[in-house]
Amino acid sequence: MIDEIDELDAYFKKMGEPSEGEAVKLEHMMMEKVSVNPSRRKLLRIVGIFGKSEKQLKEESGLNDFFFKFNMDFLQKEGFLKFEEGMYRLTDAGIAMHDSVC
């Protein structure tokens, strides 16, 4: 019996890891998505260097639940924020972004 090759698996295997240039381009695109969005900049500014709880962030940002969760998920997924010990804190990338856009 011959193993069948799934076309999607073959495609993704062919894609592999992005080159260094592609990785830098993707990183810059993510940074642009944060810097051009006023809600994300505001959240980074509010978190600041000391961190904030979710309750504090919701109150100070004034965002409704949907937009708060949407933007916080984006910032965490892209590595700008982390959640530890009940507080949201900036990562190294978040600190760099905070310093440049806030």
Image (tube, rainbow, N blue to C red):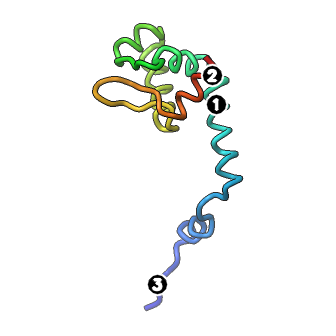
Q: Residue furthest bottom?
A: 1
Say whether residue 36 is left or right of residue 90: right
Q: Which mark is residue 3?
A: 3
Q: Secondary structure at mark 1?
A: helix
Tag 1 and tag 3, C-beta contact below 8 Å: no
Residue type at mark 2: give it.
Asn
- The residue that label 1 is drawn on is 33
Looking at the rendered image, the quarter that the N terminus falls into is bottom left
Whole-Å distance between the Cαs marked 1 and 2? Answer: 6 Å
Residue type at mark 3: give it.
Asp
**Residue 71: percent from left, percent from top:** 50, 25
Q: Secondary structure at mark 2?
A: loop
Total residue callouts: 3
**Residue 10: percent from left, percent from top:** 57, 71
Say whether residue 14 is left or right of residue 53: right
Whole-Å distance between the Cαs marked 1 and 3? Answer: 42 Å
Foreground mark, 3 or 2?
A: 2
- The residue that label 2 is drawn on is 37
Tag 1 and tag 2, C-beta contact below 8 Å: yes
Q: Closer to the camera, 99 or 41? A: 99
Give the residue at x 56% y 69%.
Answer: 13
Q: Which mark is residue 43?
A: none
- Image height check: is 29 above or below 5? above
